[in-house]
Image (cartoon, rainbow, N blue to C red):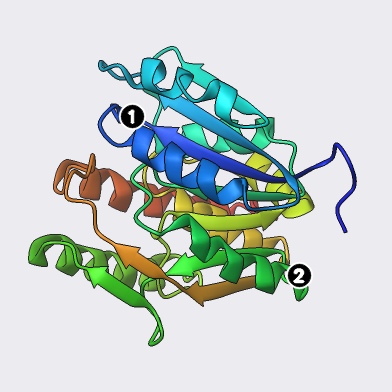
């Protein structure tokens, strides 16, 4: 049973130049939320950009109980945007998802199941035997992803097979504690929040999900990979300095 007027689920979506995809994503999320008995909110964090993402998002404001638009004055990074949206959210559960919705929103049920079972964090994964990767990334992107996961294990050791799937859900207390300690602003923030969750003693469950690659990634495979590698060493330093405890 859900408490009247209390927000049960917050959905946070970081968006950078997403005018071509964000409308379809919002339609699917809103349709899903309308089938639920609980109150929910959607928070779209627009990370600068040069296109009409904000105009597209505004068209959906009247179609959902609560849709909040947050604008970064300049491009701050995906990690910064997700952190800002999560800390602004009010839901008992906080789900963040990529703007392309590569993991269908219905897969959230699998994450809720484990949170209801007592875990504090539940994350979608493409790296488990039961995961269903229906449309793969290009060979080079998939290979780089596997290499990155091996480097993660060597440097920071999160204990997670797939840190980069953009579909993660937190209970309120875990979200507040983890994201307040987050430092990394770029794409590697996923690794950091999982490391923080581990250091804070939160129970994390990696859950196999359906995943379909969207071909229009905003990740620059060379430049962003170098930044992410640099960020891993920063995390190692912060971890050794006890900043995540």
> Seen in the image, is 89 located left or right of residue 164?
right
- x, y (%) of residue 119? 72, 71
Residue 123 makes an appearance in the image: yes
Which image quadrant: the N terminus?
Answer: bottom right
Q: Nearer the viewer, residue 225 or 136?
A: 136
Residue at the location (51% across, 53% down)? 192
Above/below status of 3 relative to 69: below
Please, what secondary structure does the residue beneath circle 1 have?
A: loop
Name the residue rendered at 25%, 31% in the picture.
20
Instruction: Check disc 1: other Cα within 10 Å, few if <14, some if 14-19, many if 20+.
Output: many
Q: Which residue in the protein does label 2 denote? A: 116
x and y percent of residue 195 in the render?
56, 61
Q: Quadrant of residue 23?
A: top left
Relative vertical location of residue 231 with respect to residue 210 in this rendering, above or below: above
Q: Which quadrant of the view contains residue 132? A: bottom left
Indicate left or right for 126 with 146 as reference: right
- Left or right: 19 as drawn, with respect to 131: left
**Circle 1 is placed at which residue position?**
16
Q: Nearer the viewer, residue 214 or 27?
A: 27
Q: Tell which of 159 and 48 is nearer to you.
A: 48
Disc 2: CA contacts within 10 A as few (<14), some (14-19) or many (>=20):
few
């Amino acid at each position: 049973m859900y408490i009247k007027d209390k927000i049960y689920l917050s959905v946070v979506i970081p968006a950078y130049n997403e005018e071509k995809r964000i409308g379809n994503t919002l339609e699917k999320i809103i349709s899903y939320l309308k089938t639920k008995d609980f109150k929910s909110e959607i928070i779209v964090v627009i990370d600068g950009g040069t296109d009409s993402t904000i105009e597209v998002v505004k068209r959906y404001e009247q179609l959902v109980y609560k849709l909040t638009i947050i604008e970064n004055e300049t491009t701050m990074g995906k990690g910064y945007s997700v952190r800002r949206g999560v800390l602004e959210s009010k839901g008992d559960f906080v789900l963040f998802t990529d703007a392309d919705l590569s993991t269908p929103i219905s897969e959230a049920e699998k994450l809720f199941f484990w949170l209801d079972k007592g875990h504090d964090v539940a994350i979608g994964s493409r790296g488990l035997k039961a995961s269903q990767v229906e449309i793969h990334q290009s060979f080079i992107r998939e290979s780089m992803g596997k290499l990155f996961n091996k480097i993660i294990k060597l440097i920071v050791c999160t204990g997670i097979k797939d840190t980069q799937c953009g579909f993660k859900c937190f209970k309120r207390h875990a979200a507040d504690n983890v994201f307040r300690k987050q430092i990394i602003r770029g794409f590697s923030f996923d690794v950091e929040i999982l490391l923080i969750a581990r250091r804070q003693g939160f129970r994390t469950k990696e859950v196999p999900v359906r995943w379909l690659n969207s071909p229009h990634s905003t990740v620059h495979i060379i430049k962003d990979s170098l930044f992410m590698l640099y960020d891993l060493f920063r995390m190692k330093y912060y971890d050794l300095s006890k900043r995540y405890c």
